[in-house]
Image: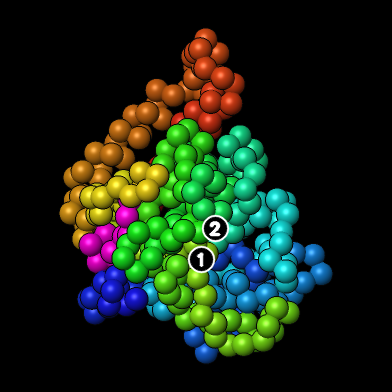
Amino acid sequence: MLDKLGFRKLHEVGITGKGVKVVVADTGVYSSHPMLYGKVKGEVSFVPDEPVTDLCGHGTSVASIIACLAPDADIYSVKVLDKDGHGYLGWILHAYDYSISIGADVMNMSLGSPINCCVSSIAMAHYRAVSYGVIPVYAVGNYGAGRVSCPAMVWGSVSVGSSNLDGDPASFSSCGAGCLGDPKPLCMEYGGGDDYCILTAWSPESVLFRSETVCIRGTSQATPIFSSIVALTVQMMRDKEGVKPNNNDIVSWAYQSTGTRVRCGGAGVVDAYRYVITAKSVGVGTWFLARFLEGLRSLITNKDVLKSILMFTPAPWYIKAIIYSHIVGGGGGHS
């Protein structure tokens, strides 16, 4: 993975995720694992009657991928799923608030449900987190073609699928239209496919099976690969350009770096080195122009004026709700 997706070349020039805060919202993390020792800077559990450690194994698998690909990133474990990998909406919503409270840069959510959440508390939580500079990265789901999981379906979000070794989508990797028809997933990574699995850490305290490693496949494993790319990009932009990318930048650069479209219309497999180079080539001038336009938008989108405009706009109420929440609450990130 280090060589196949260009991570090693980035590490060799000091782009390792240093100073970047990455939240892993999952089943918790077994932080004493050799692959994770010293990498986890904070742990919290929102699952009643369960400790912060990982009693499932899934969160440890996800976190170990980030620890390998963005080795100097600070990982924060937020437990929102129980030992069986199940969770409630209220638990998951806490992850957004926690990410905002610690000033997280990236939030990895390798979780989802086949429910529709286009207009919901989780969609609003997503837009609020984005407005505070958090970049949520979601697994698109393992439901196959035609079904996209929540919250990956939320409009404008970063969603990740898993590919086979030849770069084609794995048969289990979900794909379809997002809430406003945008293609999902945004991109793919080598998280295990029909023809291979990837070796990750596992929790020896898991109630499913006790092991320190596992060969596994799924969009849950593809997602932390792209989260790692985002973390490296955040570090590069801060160190080299003095600015921080936001959610919209991450989406735009995914298409620019691959130049391809695959099943369902999303970008193909994203190479870490090419992605970071693409982000760097945007340049400070272009970046500040985009931020200037966002600032101009904030000046002219007074909430009361916007409400009046939407009131007389011939569109369904739920579309109006999404537009309002995105413009007012889902703008650019904070530096």
How far across and down, in percent of the image, does residue 105 sit? 45, 59
- Residue most toward the top? 312
- Is residue 322 in view? yes
Would you name the residue on which mark 2 appears? 142
Q: Say whether marks 2 and 1 touch (CB < 8 Å).
A: yes
How far across and down, in percent of the image, does residue 17 sit? 37, 70
Would you name the residue on which mark 1 appears? 218
Q: Is residue 40 above or below residue 170?
A: below
Name the one closer to the observer, 96 or 175. Answer: 175
How far across and down, in percent of the image, does residue 244 sit? 34, 54
Categorize mark 1 by other alpha carbons within 10 Å: few (<14), some (14-19), many (20+): many
Q: Is residue 198 above or below residue 328?
A: below
Categorize mark 2 by other alpha carbons within 10 Å: few (<14), some (14-19), many (20+): many
Amino acid type shown at disc 1:
Gly
Q: Earlier in the sequence, mark 2 or mark 1?
A: 2
Name the one closer to the observer, 206 or 72. Answer: 206
- Residue most toward the right? 49
User: For numbered disc 1, what is the local secondary structure?
Assistant: loop
Q: Is residue 308 above or below residue 159?
A: above
The magenta segment: 267-275
Indicate the quadrant containing the N terminus: top left, top right, bottom left or bottom right. bottom left
* C-alpha span from label 2 to label 1: 7 Å
- In the rendered structure, the answer to whether residue 275 lies left or right of residue 109 reads left
Q: Is residue 193 above or below residue 307?
A: below
Amino acid type shown at disc 2:
Asn
Residue 250 shown in magenta: no
